[in-house]
Amino acid sequence: MAVITVAPQSIELTTELPGRTSPYRIAEIRPQVSGLIQKRLFVEGSEVKAGQVLYQIDPAPFEAALANAEAALGRAEANLPAVQARAERFKALLADKAVSRQAYDDAAAALKQAQADIEFYKAAVQSARINLGYTKITSPISGRIGKSSVTEGAIVTAYQPAPLASVQQLDPIYVDVPQSTTELLRLQRRLEQGRLSGAAANQNKVRLILEDGTEYPLEGTLQFRDVTVDPTTATVILRMIFPNPKRVLLPGMFVRARVKEGVRPQAILVPQPAVQRTPQGSPFVLVVDAKGVAQRRMLTLDRAIGDQWLVSSGLAAGDRVIVEGLQRVRPGMPVKAVPLGAGKQPSSSADRTSQPPAKSN
């Protein structure tokens, strides 16, 4: 019978989790003043820069308000010297008791009021200038802008609920992936028990599988695990960030993220054809003992890796597992075990080295 000898090896474990993409930043464009849209200054679906003017609101009412505030400020400033001189004269005359104390107090109060009026109108000028600036609606971020909800001639109101358009930054882009708390606890337990090492190279690096099954060429980074569990799904969110220079990834796209769990330093792998199941579905293999007799060995399987099974328990280093001729052998039968020929060696995953299989009669 063809057998392979079990040899522990170090492998890197990964898991694939479904998720969706979301923009790195998103800005909903809303007016900050009310008015009539004169111009739309962008092409829908194009790239825009931070500070770029997107819409022009009719500035005429705001220019008039600014001119009015500047005129009021000028009037207040023109009145100040006369009021100030009167207050100074009354102060000098008060020392000679040429005027009453009440007259001086009235003059001093008029001076303070004139100074306060100037500050008030300065603020009014600044407010009018700000409102005039708001007639140019600009983009707060760089990114791709979507469709416009208004055209020229539309009336808009300040801070209206409906945005005029949305700008999304797509490079880089987020991928949000839910992970079950059950799997998270299992992973933590494996790390604590030493069955899994978290010291893998580039542990936070993530690969992405697109909707059509192809692998995204650029590698991403795992940023964080959320600390709040969604009570409806019993999952936590893993957020990853991927470079997206060619805009291949779009917001809302369904993807699968290949996340690194860690390194299993003493992993035991057996070819999938060597694993059989009882009528109850329990997995087992046939091994050749030291006396050359086939024995049934019940297994606990972790997961499939390529064309092999990762065995959690049931096998040890040095066990000889029958991989060919299983139809002709039963537990308790004497067998002649020879190593599987190199030409029929089972294939293995690219990210691990497999034990040289054996061949038997």
Image (tube, rainbow, N blue to C red):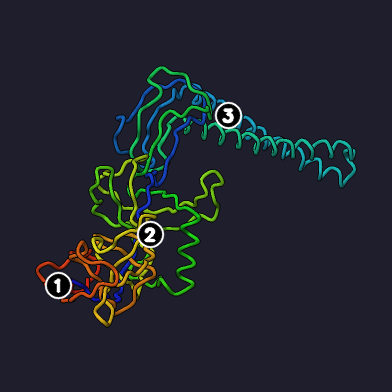
- Please report the residue visible at 23 percent of the width from the left and 48 percent of the height from the top: 214
Q: Is residue 89 left or right of residue 78?
A: right
Picture coordinates of residue 234, whole percent (x, y): 52, 49
The residue lying toward the viewer, choosing from 347 and 227, is 347
**Quadrant where the image shows the N terminus:** bottom left
**Residue in front for this viewpoint, 103 or 3:** 3
Which residue has dot 2 on it?
A: 282
- Point 35% across, 28% down: residue: 147
Secondary element at tag 3: helix
Left or right placement of residue 105 versus residue 140 in this view: right
Which of the two labelled residues, at mark 1 and mark 2, occupies the earlier sequence position? 2
Q: Amino acid at mark 1?
A: Ser
Question: Is residue 334 rendered to the left or right of residue 303?
Answer: left
Please name whichever residue, 358 or 198, is drawn nearer the observer in this view of the structure: 358
In this figure, which residue is indicated by the disc labeled 1? 360
Residue beneath disc 3 = 69
Pick whichever, 79 or 280, lies toward us. Answer: 280
How many labels were placed on the picture?
Answer: 3
CB within 8 Å, label 3 to label 1: no
